Amino acid sequence: MSNAITSSPKGYPSSARSRGGSGGSSNLVTPRPINGSSARSGSFTAPGNPYPNGPGSFSSSLRSVMTTSAMSMSGVLGGAASEYGGDGNGLSPSSEQLMEDLNNKLQRAIKYKEGAENLLIVLDSKKKAKEAKEAEREYNNMKMEIDNLERKIAAVREKSELSNVTMLGLSDDEGGRLNGFELTGDISPAESPTVSLTDILRSLEETDCPPQHYIEKANELVALFKRHPNLKYELNWITFGMRIQRMLLSESKEVVAAGYRVTRYAITDLQSLKIIRGLHTDELVVLSLASKSNLEREQALKFVRAFLEIPGGVREIARSVVRAIVAIAEFNEDRLRGIAIETLAEVMTLDPEVVSSAGGVRVLTQVLADGPWEIADALSLAFLYLLDMPQSRKYVRAGHDLEIVFAAFTDTSSSPKAVSEDKLKSSARIISSMLKSWPGLLCLSMFNLRALRSLVDSLRVPSSIVRDVILELLFDVFRIKPPSWTPTYLAGRRLTTYGRVANLKSDTSGKPGKDDRSQGQLVDHYTSLVLATFVDAGLLEVLISLVKDNSDQAIVRKTTLLLGETLKLASQLLPSNYSARLQLLPDLFSTAAKLEVESRFTASSAVYQIDSLNRTLYRSLSPGQTHRGILEDEKRGARQVELKMKLNMTIDNQHFSNLLVDTGVVDKKGYVKWNWTVLNEVIQGPLLNAKRLDEAMKGTKFMKRLFSFYRPFKYRFCDIKNTKPNHRYVETGCALFKTLLQTNEGVKFLGENKILKQIAFCLEQLVRGAGSGTGTTEPLFSSARLHETLSWGYFSMLGVLSGDTKGLAMMEKWHMFSTFYHITDLQSRPDLSELFVRTMDFTLEGHPRIILSKVLTNGPKNVRLMATNHLRSLATPSSENITPRTSETAEWAIRLLITQLYDPDVEVCETAVRILEEACNSTQILEYVVKCRPALDHLGEIGAPLLLRFLSTSVGYHYLNELDYINREMDDWFHGRNDSYVLTVEASLARAFFTDDEPSRNRRDIVGSSHGISSSGMTSFPSTANLGNVPPHFYRELARTSEGCKLLKEKGHFEEFAMFIREHGREAEDPEIVTKVKGCLWAVGNIGSMPFGAPFLDEAEIVGEIVRIAEESEVLTLKGTAFFVLGLVAKTMQGLEILLENGWDGTTTTMGQPLGYCMPMGLKKLLSVEPWKHTRDETSDASRPALLSTIGTEDSVDTRILRTMSNLSNHIKEKAAAGELLKLKQSHPTRFSSPTLFKRAMMLLESFRYRFQVRRFILELFDRSVLEEIIVGAREPGEGEGEEMS
């Protein structure tokens, strides 16, 4: 749902809005201020315009009338200037001199600013705080001076352009047709905006003109408002309103639509809305929304939507207008129904009372159940917003308005064959979005889980479509990522070949750091509550009954998979008192044990399938749950390969000769006929033995022929197409180079071979040009060849050499590094620098490191960004590969990353901060980063996460304390950042759930599908892994060290937070106080989640109060925040003990380590939401402006007409009442010209529900002159009132 509130334009200065006279055309606008900051006359766009498509415009997904943009005048004015003798630059001689002086001052100020910035960086690095403050003050002064000079330059240029255009002396006709350009709907650039506005409004005052005249002038006025947004603040609304009223009362529907459009663009603030309503626009809009002209109706609806874009403007939308929009929304065949529903939803979030009293909630509820489906998903968010706070919750009927969505599943029990799959899937999406929010979950859990029980029981309906949709819904709600072997299993194949080491490597490559695992996920904690709620609703019993049912094997397999995943999820997330009883599955085992029952075979098969699934799931755990068995499998596979290589090294002569023959290299010249699998085994096995290598080099043609294939000037290897299967040739070449480096004979052979000389020569071609004398017309390492052939493989082979001291010596011998230094300077070939960074080995001191450092500082932005990202693999070695060499490389990479923090491009700095933050998961690297003492003040918010990580160690704490960072940041968080942190957490959760929806919605129905889950669905899960984590919190990092806890105690912040929670924890009316309570809860929870911070909880005795908020608060999101905070408390053993004392149990590992998940002993305590009293809907007499008994008059005919109109709201009496009204109009035509009767009819339309066609029928009975008479009669007092308001 689009945002209902947008920022409004700044109010024009009151001094510039002096009231003018009324009636005369000369007083249509007030004089412009001399020093006002108005828009430039020559500018035909409105920079900073908050309404790019106009106020009240529809979203791009819905149909709208597109307004034509004004024709650009760039170049036209210059052409006219040269034609009439102007110089074309728009500046007079005096203006040129002033402009030159200002530009010189601006350049000097910019230089001073850059110098102050550089000085500030130097002083910060040297810890000279006093001098740094003076430099910072100078920097800020220069920045203000630069802004001031830029404003002066813009003002001088504007004034010069206006004066120069005026001197051209163009007539109106010439100004409209410069150089042959027709300016339809535009204003002459030779006129000032104020003059143009006056002329347009004078033209609108003319009478007896054709409709096209008014339409053109209205379009010109809209174009003028677009180009000069501040111009609308100069309007005299008395005279301007009279012009608009005349247009809105026109007989031409197009003129009326143009009037709405002009008025919409003239809106400025809340006061202007009140003035506009004084022009009787409420009655006019009601008439227009019932019009037969779609253009008029659309512009009227846009006009109403423009009210939503003004803060407080929703209060100015009359109930009669909302009634008219409701009539459109419930008329299925209306083309404006979609935008009417969206408008109602937006109004409901801002002012639910007016929508409820107008019957809009009823219509929106029906949309949830019956569609249109593309709107229903977003509409559910509006209802969830209302359910949060008690004062807005009363407009939604408890147990009805939301539960209507479940009817799509429960109604199928009576007729399972008549099922609409689209309706089921739409309802499932809405239920999923509800269950992923606190208001939705808690409200659906009311009345003893009635709604959720009905959904679970719908699985018993004998319909494969219903069961499949509900199972997909449960997969989505529980955030279960189906394993890669799911399609194979659902196809009915056996689980025998899954969980291999090759597949597991890809799953464990992205292992999070130690700190990330301990951080836990908020989404997982929420999922544990959803899982426990469904278990209480009887999910497992129903799933077991489905498994026993053998009617649809696809559904049975899918149910078995869900059952196994649910049991695994319960063992990971739920406390032992919940999960232990779930794992037993007593009903299934008892059925399998009864030999006399026929269903025992199905039950036994289900037990076997669940056991097989659990074993397979255990082998294919996700990255965050990788266990020791997977690592042992990887090591076992590596040992097997190593053992095979050792065995190949000890083979006898005959076996070795046979292997060489089997490769095909000895007796066949064509590389296609070689056996590359055997060749790899020979290179990585026997050739590691110096004796065997010598035999291959001297006794056979093996090495000679093999190197002949790889030599560049033979054009065999380097001409092979760059395809994935052909990459094995590159891998074999790299293995060959690595093998030769292991022995002295191999090093000697490689050094004497021509291959390195030829590679060096081809690299030199890039520096000195393409002329090589080798007969080739294109260099070997040209962009095309690197992309299309395997020429890039030579860089990979050189990368193998760069990882060995002997290889580096050979590269230096052929002056390759000198060439690489020059290659990195080639601005036209950044791809070579990127290829060098990707392929070289930087674990040794030498030229490769120097070249990488050069690329990081002097390369183009894309290359610097890529090289910075490459440092991630060097700075964060895996825990299994920690050696002195990798540790030294990591420290070197850390130093380079710290250098990248000062890169001129912000994106590079952000990337470096992100990599350093990941690397700081290791305590050793974190201490080294702190030891380097990086200065991060110049990065602002970008470097804040890294500075917070510094607080987690004593070394970092003392470093930041010296910079006075801790006290400043602590005060900042205490006085405001806690509140903004609440929005950060809630946005993170919303994004996590929203991104989670995509794979589940894009996932194809995998029952009976050979493809199963799409690749996009599988790859999108890891990207959301960090969204549900607890975002970095200052107090959390501060509480990691004893020094931080000591400072926290001295400041007394924890006690302040605890006191605020006690005093305002039950707040349910003021949203600002609720937000502050949430901020205090997050601060307390983050402090208590650390071992050093847990004692604060015990001292303040605050956990009991948090538990009461979670169980008793009337604000549903506040209950959710307290639940998450209790999960943070459960991260320490001391916190678990405190929770047990308060009736909550935590989840631990088998070794007793807390995981940060907790649950109340009795789930009803948390899910308890008291039913509320529904109030103020359309059926309530209190919400009607007038009862039927009070609408009648002393005139019997008028009373009869009104009584008959009231009968039109009854669909049984509707037909007879319509015929009687037509007879009454024929017999009493003058009655339908009475303003009094019209007003009473309008009151009827506002008070009672009428279908859209009936509303149109009633309004068409009256002459349009009735409204003109009403407006003319009220114009005299309206004018006086308008003068006061203007």
Image (spheres, helix red, strand yellow):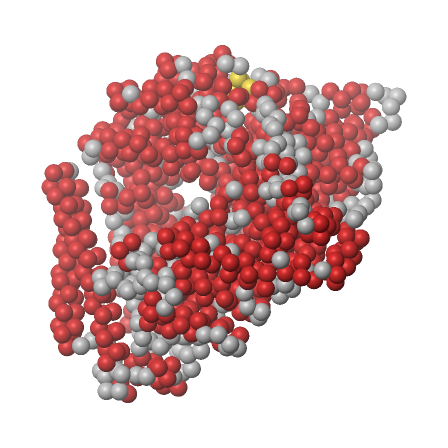
Image quadrant where one finds the C terminus: bottom left
| Residue 405 visible (yes or no) | yes
Residue 713 appears at what percent x and percent y?
A: 41, 70
Residue drawn at 40 percent across, 72 percent down: 202
Name the residue at 17% across, 55% down: 145
Q: Nearer the viewer, residue 1083 or 514?
A: 1083
- 1251 sits left or right of 306 in the view: right
Q: Residue 499, percent across and down?
A: 61, 38
Q: Is residue 572 above or below residue 774?
A: above
Q: Nearer the viewer, residue 910 or 262?
A: 262
Residue at image position (38%, 66%) is: 23
Quadrant in which residue 1072 is drawn: top left
Q: Is residue 352 above or below residue 770?
A: above
Q: Quadrant of residue 419?
A: top right
Question: Is 1136 situated above or below 238?
Answer: above
Percent x, y for residue 1039?
A: 33, 24
Q: Is residue 59 left or right of residue 1216?
A: left
Task: Note whether residue 468 is visible.
Answer: no
Instruction: Give the residue drawn at x 33%, y 72%.
Output: 195
